[in-house]
Image (cartoon, rainbow, N blue to C red):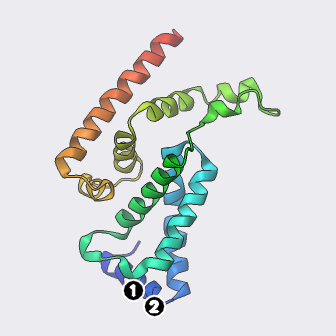
Amino acid sequence: MWTEAEEGERVRQVARGDRQAFAELAAHYLPRLEQFVTRLSGRPALGEDLAQDTLLQLWLEARRFDPARGRLSTWLYRIARNRFLDQQRQGWRWQGLESLEGQEGVSDPALEQFSEVREVQRALQRLPERQRSALLLSYYEGLSQKEVARVLGLGLRAVESLIVRARRALGKSLEEAHERTR
């Protein structure tokens, strides 16, 4: 959409209080941030809240962004992930689609159509948080491993290892789930 230089200029404009520049960045990043946190947490409402909170941080702290240290998306994903981890520390726990079972207005056939999605969600949630974050940022959000390393505050080799372990564990978990349903 924008070059890194153009995006950096928009962030500088936001730091000076330019609402139009902020609106453009927010329109671009809000859906991506919501999707990332929703996948990380399994809760769409939390995805919305934390994505908005992340963009509020952009508005309040745009001066802290340094384009020499990485792309804006990397900085925003790091903020969103940190907000998610803060939520977990405060005692929140993931409640994916299983929390819908037994609720009024939700039929068994409606839940059955999501069986594969549910299994992937369950398998993702069984991964350690770092592995889950690395996998989501790399595969779903399209960040390079170098960018994932910046978001997670790790070295490149550590991220490579996390992704390999996550893929292996995810595959094993899905294979076991498939065997149970046979």
Q: Whole-percent x and y of residue 27?
A: 55, 71
- Marks 2 and 1, how far apart at CA: 6 Å
Q: Whole-percent x and y of residue 113?
A: 64, 28
- Amino acid type, callout 1: Arg
Q: Whole-percent x and y of residue 34?
A: 54, 56
34 in relation to 120, above or below? below
Could you tell me which secondary element the residue under label 1 belongs to? helix
- Amino acid type, callout 2: Arg
- Identify which residue is drawn at 44% across, 86% down: 15
Could you tell me which secondary element the residue under label 2 belongs to? loop
Q: Whole-percent x and y of residue 155?
A: 19, 52
For label 2, count other residues whose C-alpha is less than 10 Å away and answer few (under 14), some (14-19) or many (20+): few
The residue beneath circle 1 is: 12
92 in relation to 167, above or below? below
Residue 36 visible to an observer of this rendering: no
Q: Quadrant of residue 50?
A: bottom right
Classify the position of the N terminus by image quarter: bottom left
Q: Is residue 41 left or right of residue 70?
A: right
81 in relation to 95, above or below? below
Residue 61 visible to an observer of this rendering: yes
For label 1, count other residues whose C-alpha is less than 10 Å away and answer few (under 14), some (14-19) or many (20+): some
Q: Are marks 2 and 1 in contact (CB under 8 Å)?
A: yes
The residue beneath circle 2 is: 16
The residue at the far front in this view is 90
- 31, 58: nearer the viewer: 58
Q: Quadrant of residue 175?
A: top left
Q: Which mark is residue 127?
A: none
Tell how many labels. Answer: 2
